[in-house]
Image (cartoon, rainbow, N blue to C red):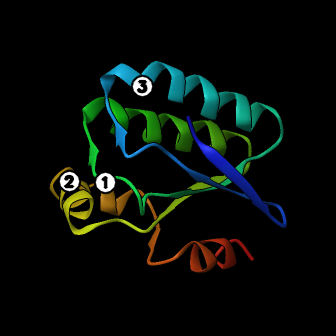
Amino acid sequence: MFTTEMHGNVLVMSPPAELVVSRSEEAKAFLTATVEDGHSQLVVDLAKMTFIDSSGLGVLIGAKKVANNAGGDVRLCGLSPQVQTIFQLTRLDRVFKTFATSDQAVASFD
């Protein structure tokens, strides 16, 4: 579902092109397990994402809560104009730190 790559202590993850209700339970379980495995500093690279629905947003919010409780955070990068609009309309752009690139997001943890 997600592709992952370690950058120091930060795990960069790329979700599928669409994070929708049919994939939300699997995504939630994967992200929760990732944090429970000790990876609480996460960057979710949305560069390939074309659509996210409310359940997908819920998955990201849940992952942020789990990561925060473990002393980490979830940061986003690569939001397309369409996805950025969704985050602005839902005001989640105020909840998540967003960056243009994964390198910038990874560096923000230092």
Q: Which residue is mark 2?
A: 86
Instruction: Please tell me which residue is depicted at 69% across the width and 71% down the height of the picture.
Output: 109
Residue 20: assigned label? none
Which mark is first along the chain, 1 or 2? 2
Residue 92: assigned label? 1
Position of 86 with respect to 107 (left or right) is left
Distance from disc 2 to disc 1, alpha carbons, whole Å, reads: 8 Å
In-front residue for pair 92/103: 103
The answer to whether the residue labelled 2 contacts the one labelled 1, judged by CB atoms less than 8 Å apart, is yes
Instruction: Please tell me which residue is depicted at 33% across the width and 62% down the height of the picture.
Output: 94
Is the N terminus in the top left, top right, bottom left or bottom right quadrant? Answer: top right
Name the kind of residue labelled 2 in the image. Ile
Q: Image quadrant of residue 59?
A: top left
Residue 37 in percent (x, y) is at 82, 34
Badge 1 element: helix
In-front residue for pair 107/52: 52
Is the C terminus in the top left, top right, bottom left or bottom right quadrant? Answer: bottom right
Name the kind of residue labelled 3 in the image. Ser
Position of 1 with respect to 71 (left or right) is left
Residue 24: assigned label? 3
Circle 2: is it few (<14), some (14-19), or many (20+) Cα within 10 Å? some
Circle 3: is it few (<14), some (14-19), or many (20+) Cα within 10 Å? some
Which mark is first along the chain, 1 or 3? 3
Residue 23 in percent (x, y) is at 41, 25
Viewer-side label of 2, 1: 2
Instruction: Please tell me which residue is depicted at 53% across the width and 27% down the height of the picture.
Output: 28
Which mark is first along the chain, 3 or 2? 3
Distance from disc 2 to disc 3, alpha carbons, whole Å, reads: 17 Å
